[in-house]
């Protein structure tokens, strides 16, 4: 039911009988009604001027309002919710500083193609535009514009319906992304006739229209795929987002083509699938002759499609690329067969052309991959079985790997450098959209925001696998986790520093090295401070016990997993991106 304010319009005048009652609504209620009309039932945010009452009223009107300790984490939660649900996640903030705090998450969502809407209150337009020094003065719309897909401002209550509809459509249609919606403080208190207000709202019809690929483009792609001697299918997080899971699996299995999942596409097919080539990644990228990209961009994570990684120094490579964004094509290397459309429609169109007579991927190719894979898997098995003291990244992660195997519905959130890189290859995923991580930017600080969103929108257990540095960015949100009693277990991989804890200040002054933290910090006490369970784990047995108890009980838990402080390598597996000093000491 929409919210209205009942206001007596006129008092009785002589002989006029009962006073007419006009039902009014206001900006607050129109925003809430517009969101609810579009099946948006959750707001991630942080109350304050001028949106405190909006938070209260949204809750009173039956929306879930998850209130954070810092807007960046509310924004990250909105982005993750968008990725998981295909509905734009909503982040609500106060003006200027709160807005800016939310902006990193908005930009990150846009970069990752996650649909979200950052709604920020803003100060008085007249004063802001004349730069007369208003409370939290800032031209937020102008600042947001270059960092997101679209940005809108609503000045009149009767335009709220259009503003929200445009924001939803912009976030979801085509390539998904972040949208900014600016709502000046004055708008919230504006009133209008309730019936007219209701009529002004828009229920967005078909917000992410299917885009059917052209038949000639489908034929071109099929012809190239069929001609391949060493084909590979590369699944990206766009493929995970698309929720075309059964067709993607059918495409892989019917063609027999080996596939590689990008990190957030892990679990689209179980990582234990025979056709997974993840454990022979370097070999496959270098040797493949035809690569079918499904919702993955040839950006830095894929060495831009060229160079040594791709073996392009040795031979040519041809790409088929499925993407919803036509301008993604040829962005790094020539794409021989672009297939533009939504992944569901494109994969279905390919499947329609792949019958029982389709030649399976050549056995010499799949055999060579299997050989390399087996070697890497055996090597990995040995490392995972070892029980060094203190724990290594691998031994601690083997515990998490076993837990996910036992509870494949659990969601893994993962950030850090070494903690991220080791976990990506060690922790097998079995179901789609169960892994959330630092994504396209390699951003740190998504941990607790993503974990809260995952728990709130799915109700499933969440295991946040956190480097100790990465955890620091959003650590205060453990209070949020406790407040909402969310089934989240945070495992902090504590090796006393960024990358590792052994760096030394060479200057001899009292300060420790810039990469070093307080030794043997008790992150578990942070969770205990708010009523959650804190565990200090120095062995895999302790870690295993605490983790399985946390997942079974659903109680907010933080396990401080002590890792060998010398174990990490600089920047994990992307140390090559560190500039080297030109001056030799
Ligand atoms: C993978 N591998 C495995 C397995 N899975 N071996 C055994 N068993 C399993 N299950 C092998 C794989 O074949 C590779 O070996 C190696 O492990 C690494 O695999 P990975 O992690 O898939 O590949 P790689 O080369 O690290 O991937 C490149 C990348 C990735 C750029 C996509 O590094 C990445 O996503 N990085 C993000 C980093 C980031 O954002 N960091 C945050 C900033 S940190 P070989 O085939 O032998 O090579 C700030 O400092
Ligand atoms: P990864 O980092 O896993 O490789 P990227 O974020 O680089 O993935 O790529 C995701 C790609 O998927 C983007 O180019 C985006 O345009 C595309 N995409 C997202 N959703 C869809 C969809 N529903 N249909 C088609 N393409 C999509």
Image (cartoon, rainbow, N blue to C red):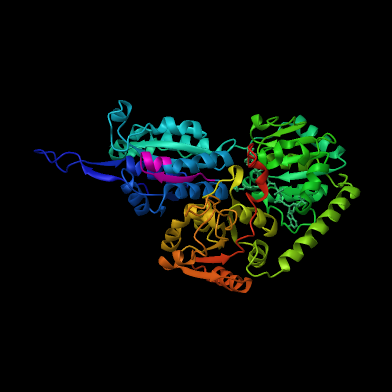
Decide if residue 450 is on the left or right side of residue 230. Answer: left
Residue that extends furthest to the right in the rendered view of this protein: 364
Decide if residue 75 is on the left or right side of residue 312. Answer: left
In depth, the one of 208 and 111 nearer the eye is 111
Where residue 385 sits: x, y (%)?
A: 73, 68
How many numbered marks appear? 0
User: Can residue 206 be spotted in the picture?
Assistant: no
Quadrant holding the C terminus? top right
Residue 562 vertical placement versus 145 (above, below): below
In depth, the one of 413 and 89 nearer the eye is 413
Would residue 481 be counted in the magenta stretch?
Answer: no
Residue 150 vertical placement versus 248 (above, below): above
Residue that extends furthest to the top in the rendered view of this protein: 130
Where residue 31 sits: x, y (%)?
A: 38, 42
Residue that extends furthest to the left in the rendered view of this protein: 14
In depth, the one of 265 and 250 nearer the eye is 265
Decide if residue 6 is on the left or right side of residue 466. Answer: left
Residue at image x 10%, y 39%? 15
Residue 155 vertical placement versus 90 (above, below): above
User: Can residue 393 be spotted in the picture?
Assistant: yes
Where residue 37 sits: x, y (%)?
A: 44, 44
Where residue 156 sits: x, y (%)?
A: 33, 32
Q: Which residues are magenta?
A: 87-100
């Amino acid at each position: 039911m929409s919210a209205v304010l009942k206001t007596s319009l006129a008092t009785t005048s002589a002989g006029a009988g009962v006073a007419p009652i006009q039902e009014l609504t206001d900006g607050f209620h129109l925003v809430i009604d517009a969101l609810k009309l579009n099946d948006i039932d959750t707001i991630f945010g942080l109350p304050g001027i001028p949106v405190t009452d909006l938070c209260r009223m949204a809750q009173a009107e039956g929306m879930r309002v998850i209130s954070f300790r810092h807007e960046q984490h509310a924004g990250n939660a909105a982005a993750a919710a968008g990725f998981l649900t295909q509905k734009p996640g909503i982040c609500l903030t106060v003006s200027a500083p709160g807005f800016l705090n939310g902006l990193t998450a908005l930009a990150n969502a846009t970069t990752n193609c996650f649909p979200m809407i950052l709604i920020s209150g803003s100060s008085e337009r007249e004063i802001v535009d004349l730069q007369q020094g208003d409370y939290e003065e800032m031209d937020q719309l102008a600042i947001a514009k270059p960092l997101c897909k679209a940005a809108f401002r609503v000045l009149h209550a009767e335009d709220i319906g259009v503003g929200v509809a445009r924001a939803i459509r912009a976030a979801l249609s085509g390539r998904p992304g972040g949208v900014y919606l600016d709502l000046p403080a004055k708008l919230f208190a504006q009133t209008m006739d309730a019936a007219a207000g209701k009529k002004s709202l828009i229920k967005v019809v078909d917000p992410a229209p299917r885009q059917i690929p052209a038949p000639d483009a489908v034929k071109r792609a099929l012809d190239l795929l069929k001609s391949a001697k060493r084909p590979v299918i590369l699944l990206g997080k766009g493929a995970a987002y698309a929720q075309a899971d059964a067709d993607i699996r059918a495409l892989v299995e019917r063609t027999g083509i080996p596939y590689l999942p990008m990190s957030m596409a892990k679990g689209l097919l179980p990582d234990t699938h025979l056709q997974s080539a993840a454990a022979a990644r370097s070999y496959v990228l270098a040797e493949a002759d035809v690569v079918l990209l499904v919702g993955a961009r040839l950006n830095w994570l894929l060495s831009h499609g060229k160079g040594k990684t791709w073996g392009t120094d040795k031979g040519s490579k041809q790409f088929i690329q499925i993407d919803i964004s036509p301008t993604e094509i040829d962005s790094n290397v020539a794409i021989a067969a672009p297939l533009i459309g939504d992944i569901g429609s494109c994969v279905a169109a390919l499947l329609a052309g792949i019958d029982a007579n389709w030649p399976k991927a050549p056995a010499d190719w799949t055999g060579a991959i299997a050989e390399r894979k087996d070697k890497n898997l055996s090597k990995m098995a040995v490392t995972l079985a070892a029980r060094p003291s203190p724990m290594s990244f691998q031994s601690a992660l083997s515990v998490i790997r076993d837990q996910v195997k036992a509870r494949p519905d659990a969601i893994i959130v993962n950030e850090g450098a070494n903690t991220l890189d080791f976990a990506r290859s060690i922790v097998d995923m079995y179901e789609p959209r169960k892994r959330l991580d630092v994504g396209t930017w390699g951003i740190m600080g998504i941990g607790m925001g993503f974990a809260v969103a995952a728990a709130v929108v799915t109700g499933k257990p969440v295991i946040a696998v956190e480097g100790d540095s990465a955890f620091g960015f959003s650590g205060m949100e453990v209070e949020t986790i406790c407040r909402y009693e969310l089934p989240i277990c945070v495992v902090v991989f504590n090796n006393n520093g960024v990358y590792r804890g052994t760096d030394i200040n060479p200057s001899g002054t009292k300060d420790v090295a810039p990469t070093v933290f307080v030794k043997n910090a008790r992150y578990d006490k942070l969770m205990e401070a708010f009523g959650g369970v804190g565990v200090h784990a120095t062995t895999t047995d302790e870690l295993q016990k605490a983790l399985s108890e946390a997942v079974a009980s659903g109680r907010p838990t933080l396990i401080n997993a002590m890792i060998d402080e010398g174990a990490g390598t600089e920047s994990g597996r992307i140390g090559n991106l560190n500039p080297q000093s030109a001056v030799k000491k």
